[in-house]
Amino acid sequence: MSDTTIPETSRKDWMSDQEVRWCPGCGDYSILAAVQLALPDMGVRREEVVFVSGIGCAARFPYYMNTYGMHSIHGRAPAIATGLAMARPDLHVFVVSGDGDALSIGGNHLIHALRRNVNLTILLFNNQIYGLTKGQYSPTSETGKVTKSTPFGSIEKPFNPVSVALGAEASFVARTHDMDRNHMMDTIKRAHDHQGASIVEIYQNCNVFNDGAFGQITAKSARDEMLIDLRHGEPILFGADRQRGVVLDGGGVRLAEVADVGMDAVLVHDETRPDPSIAFMLSRIATGPHEPTPVGVFRAVGRDEYGSRVNQQLAAAQEQRGPGNLHDLLRSGATWEVE
Amino acid sequence: MSDTSTQPTGERTESIDRVIIRFAGDSGDGMQLTGDRFTSASAMFGNDLATLPDFPAEIRAPAGTIAGVSAFQVHISDHDITTPGDAPDVLVAMNPAALRSDLHRLKGNGSVILNIDAFTERNLDKAGYSSDPREDGSLDAYKVYEVPMTEMTKKAVEHLGVKPRDAERSKNFFALGLVSWMYTRPAEHTLEWIQQKFGKDQQVADANVAAFKAGHAFGETAELFDHAYSVKPAEKVPGTYTNITGNVALAWGLIAASQLADMPLFLGSYPITPASDILHELSKHKNFGVRTLQAEDEIAGVGSAIGAAYGGHLAITTTSGPGVALKGEAIGLAVSLELPLVVVDIQRGGPSTGLPTKTEASDLLMAMYGRHGESPMPIVAASTPAGCFDAAIEACRIALKYRTPVFLLSDGYLANGAEPWKLPDVESLPDISTTFATEANGTNDAGNPVHHPYERDPETLARSWALPGTPGLEHRIGGLEKADKTGNVSYDPGNHELMTHLRQAKLDGIAKDIPEAVLEGDADADLVVIGWGSTWGAISGGVDRVRAAGHSIARIHLTHLHPFPPNLGDLLSGFDRALVPELNLGQLSKVLRAEFLIDAKTVSKVRGLPFTAVEIEAAILDSLGVAQNGAAK
């Protein structure tokens, strides 16, 4: 490209001409706005951005972005995006997925994209319900959840998406929620800037089938006491007066009053710890979105990005053997001449 | 028993025109390696040949059992041959299980070479023999050569300080040396190869060389063998030849296609027998810019390929039947996205896990119809191991030109079978490059120029393809039904009907762009034999025999199965009856009957093995109402 400066854009430039068709009041609207507002600050060209999705309400996302995009099939977006990112390291590939798409039917692809550290920004809209199919429990629905397919209450234990991602040793794991646009924008920008696979769990309200699932922690009035904002290099504090904190305790972490334990005992957040164990413990502090819950970046570590390693092997092979020559390839085994 | 009264005359060599040798032993005995080396030596010598590796699914079934028998059949000839042969002339049996499982294949009066050291009571018992076949008369109809291979191998390598257990491992090279002497194969290539292959452990290399030479010398000096045989080089079209298996030819065809299309090659694949060798082969050639992903599962294999195709790579996924079943939904997505993709199915026996290492060609209807909705896909099927090269290029050509996923069918027999291949001149290969959209081809409601991804080429009906990274052509595609031209989501009934017909019309139109079917044999015959895929060799052999016996018969072999060649209906209408040999229960004949309303009769074989020419000959004669001995029935 001759013009090396990235053109200035505004939200409008990232909006497609398609009418947005989520239910009125859906949390997806605010996530869409946050993404469209964050993109102008990401230093990327529209034509270099691709949104890949699977199936579900969230998966309609690409249609509303004025970028390249693919609305694919249920659960497979991380696999499709892996191929695209391997083939085209010049692109900025986003995956938009939901809790059913990413953690149920597509669970295998998600953990392997994270394991390989493919250069993807994965946005996991977690509303703890199947919305598009009209209200069945999902792999993140709480035990006891009464839905159309669990009339007597779910007897399954839910996945914690951040724990799953950390278990797969993802190099970037974060959580945000649909009620705080700025927090979403900051988190998504950081996820995009990360080299390798980044995953952001976004608590998202489904006002039709699971309304208020996160209300106890994301309502403005509740946030101070219920959201634990993780900030790299700072003690992990929360509460209106930052009077509570997270402390390491007997091989685990727990919540404590700073007055009881002293500021020195409060755990200082370090996203860059090579070992994901403490990040994993932090992801387990809340048993569900009704207890103080960490948000922000749990882990951000540097690790070789998959696509660039693929390219290095290609470059090394070409350096060693020269660019492939078909004529020679066909004669690379034993040959003989017939006169 | 063998005739031991004749003179041991190593100098005496009898010339024969062809021979079929079957090496059979335990999975751990190295029979595939032995057969492969004998094949290579024969290829280098200039014989025409065809091979049939025949091994168990288990890497190591219990040693000495029938389930653990691994065999390799090779047919070498001084003239053009098309199959690995019918009944072997020679069976090399390394243990009783090998003898028991494979003796019935041997020609009457054929030769059996036994490793008698393996004929212990315990091994006889494991093979299910209640008495020793060498003593109970069951081998009377054959020439039997009893050779203490294990002991002689041990002695041959003794001076190298090899432990007896390790020494025994070289006995396949003793067998190879012996058979190489019997059929006057030049030894140099094999000796060179042993050094290359085992050079890392010089003692092993030396032991194998010593065993090979001992086997050779034994043949020359032992009184068992009265003379050796020579099979002269076949007369072949001048050129440079190599010996190639179907899977390697297919992998090279994909690399060639990538060069001819000037697009990087991407393979997304999950290991599965008998397709994995394509993944292995392509993984080696990174200097051609080939990217291979060993995906987490079959679905990710095809999914990653779809992603790479969207990014402008020549995208491939390789698998076998069970994998195709898993990929079905994603292949349907590729049909809807109208992106180029080649799905390679190396067929094997089914259903379910079926017969992983045994051949069958029973995925035709799955390739044709195995997706939900109206989801038409072109199908190309390779006919010979070397032909996999051209078939791969053809599948890629259709995929790119028509923006469609294409099925490329091969099978376990072609995949592992080998034949001499006259190497093509690279310059003569077709240009299969395609073009990408660079400028807007429509306007949106606001009147701004935009890319309409489902604008079609009026000739091919291929859609306009814009690659991510192209400024101004940003667009979205997906699995939901798309509005004609704009590609926006559409639930409009009329639009869905239109798009369904457009996708079908695009496929039908490919018929104009593929070679016409060729009728071989007698155009005025009543009966035509129609085949597809790997049955080519057996059918041509069978038809040739029938015609040589004075009967009138025609044949057609199909490479393009969907759509069919445009003249196929006309050709078929000239015959009263059609015979369709297939390694399934009649899948092509079902389609031919439906498509052309002809009286197609199936000749079926589902034994995990290819047809032999004799079987085809018998089926044709039966259909003609003639007994195989030529008498009218």
Image (cartoon, helix red, strand yellow):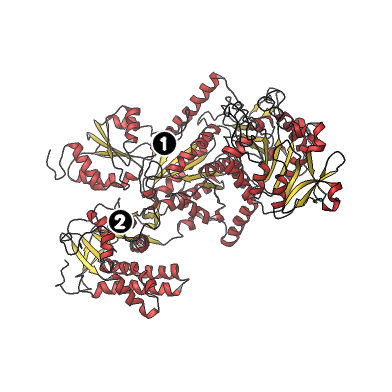
Badge 1 density bin: few <14, some 14–19, many ≥20, Cα 10 Å: some
The vertical placement of A137 against B94, above or below, is above
Number of the front mark, 1 or 2: 2
Q: Residue at x 24, y 54 (%)?
A: B105
Residue B562 percent location from the top left of the image? 41, 34
Q: Which residue bears the numbered disc 2? A: B66
Q: From the image, which quarter does the C terminus of chain B lie in?
A: top left
Q: Which residue bears the numbered disc 1? A: B366
In the image, B195 versus B160, the foreground residue is B160
In the image, A210 versus A57, the foreground residue is A210
In the image as oriented, which residue stretches furthest toward the front? A260
Q: Does residue B403 appear in this view?
A: no
Query: Helix or strand or loop: what does disc 2 sit on?
Result: helix
The vertical placement of B607 against A63, above or below, is below
- Identity, as a three-letter code, of the amino acid under mark 2: Ile
- Inter-mark Cα distance, 1 to 2: 33 Å
**Residue B93 position by quadrant:** bottom left
Residue B632 percent location from the top left of the image? 12, 39
Query: Helix or strand or loop: what does disc 1 sit on?
Result: helix
- Identity, as a three-letter code, of the amino acid under mark 1: Met
Q: From the image, which quarter does the N terminus of chain B lie in?
A: bottom left
In the image, A113 versus B434, the foreground residue is A113
Q: Residue at x 65, y 50 (%)?
A: A169
* Chain of the residue under label 1: B
* Chain of the residue under label 2: B
